[in-house]
Amino acid sequence: MKTIIVIGGSKGIGKAIVSALLPSNKVINISRSSPEKNHENLTHHECDVTKDVLPDIDAADGLVYCPGSINLKPIARLSIDDFKNDFEINVLGAVRAVQKYLDILKKGDQPSILMFSTVASKLGMPFHASVAASKSAIEGLTKSLGAELAPTVRVNAIAPTVTNTELASKLLRNDKMVEKMNDRHPLKKHLQPEEVAEMATFLLSDKAASLSGQIFEMDCGIVSFKL
Ligand SMILES: NC(=O)c1ccc[n+]([C@@H]2O[C@H](COP(=O)([O-])OP(=O)(O)OC[C@H]3O[C@@H](n4cnc5c(N)ncnc54)[C@H](OP(=O)(O)O)[C@@H]3O)[C@@H](O)[C@H]2O)c1
């Protein structure tokens, strides 16, 4: 049984990852609020990754970093503080987590790290300047750390399109918006957090032993196809 640290497992994609991992892994969740779920394999540490010291943990085989932002504004309305705050939660939180847990991960069983980008790093979309800048940094971090930590620790990222979570609730707030969003995607759908969790659990597992330094676009075709 592996032990996986999930930062941001109380909601959204992280919550779905925790649920998918729990039957066969120990999960250590770190977030500001507690996960709703109680399970003998689940422990929780309350922590704000932007302010608090990350908790000490003795052993782990995987690390998932989920916190992120969708801060969409025209460039004229994006302040420097917007860029700094987005970088803080999307990138520096992940860097702190990697630095804090790298020594224990290196001692783990086929260890790996998983982070989150977005389709907006590859696909230019209006109003995404700040989040795209931060998530492009995550993609660079994934490649760089993948190389630096090979062959001991694998490092990958998932770049999802719109996923039905609290973070994206403004983009999917009524049936018309959902229909429009689905229509923009060649596969005529958006993502459910459980689908992203399937990919995440695969990447954390030994089945993905040959994959590192990769960014996996879960894009419902929006980056890959021009129809
Ligand atoms: N949803 C989408 O459409 C979408 C699209 C592309 C990329 N992504 C990326 O996918 C990742 C997951 O997104 P999501 O939609 O699942 O987000 P979410 O619903 O906002 O969930 C984020 C998780 O991170 C935790 N978190 C947030 N800020 C934190 C902090 N300061 N300290 C500790 N924990 C914190 C939250 O828990 P607490 O509030 O309890 O702290 C929550 O468990 C993000 O990196 C996001 O940028 C999402």
Image (cartoon, grey):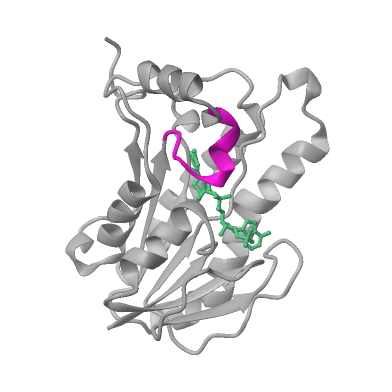
Residue 55 sits in which quadrant? bottom right
Looking at the image, the residue that sits furthest to the front is: 175
Judge whether 198 appears above or below 59 on screen: above
Residue 129 lies, in percent from the top left, at 64, 27
Who's the residue at 55% across and 43% down the image?
A: 137
Who's the residue at 45% across and 23% down the image?
A: 123
Judge whether 149 appears above or below 126 on screen: below
Give the total of numbered labels. 0
Residue 184 lies, in percent from the top left, at 39, 17
Residue 71 sits in which quadrant? top right
Residue 21 lies, in percent from the top left, at 33, 69
Judge whether 105 appears above or below 211 on screen: below
- Between 89 and 164, the one lying in front of the other is 164
Q: Quadrant of the N terminus?
A: bottom left
Residues drawn in magenta: 161-171
Residue 150 visible to the viewer: no
**In the image, is 2 to the left or to the right of 101?**
left
Residue 46 lies, in percent from the top left, at 65, 75
Who's the residue at 37% across and 32% down the image?
A: 190
Residue 164 lies in the magenta stretch = yes
- Between 46 and 88, the one lying in front of the other is 46
Looking at the image, the residue that sits furthest to the left is: 207
**In the image, is 8 to the left or to the right of 200?**
right
Q: Quadrant of the C terminus?
A: top left
**In the image, is 27 to the left or to the right of 29?**
left
Who's the residue at 39% across and 83% down the image?
A: 41
Looking at the image, the residue that sits furthest to the bottom is: 58
Residue 112 visible to the viewer: yes
Residue 21 lies in the magenta stretch = no
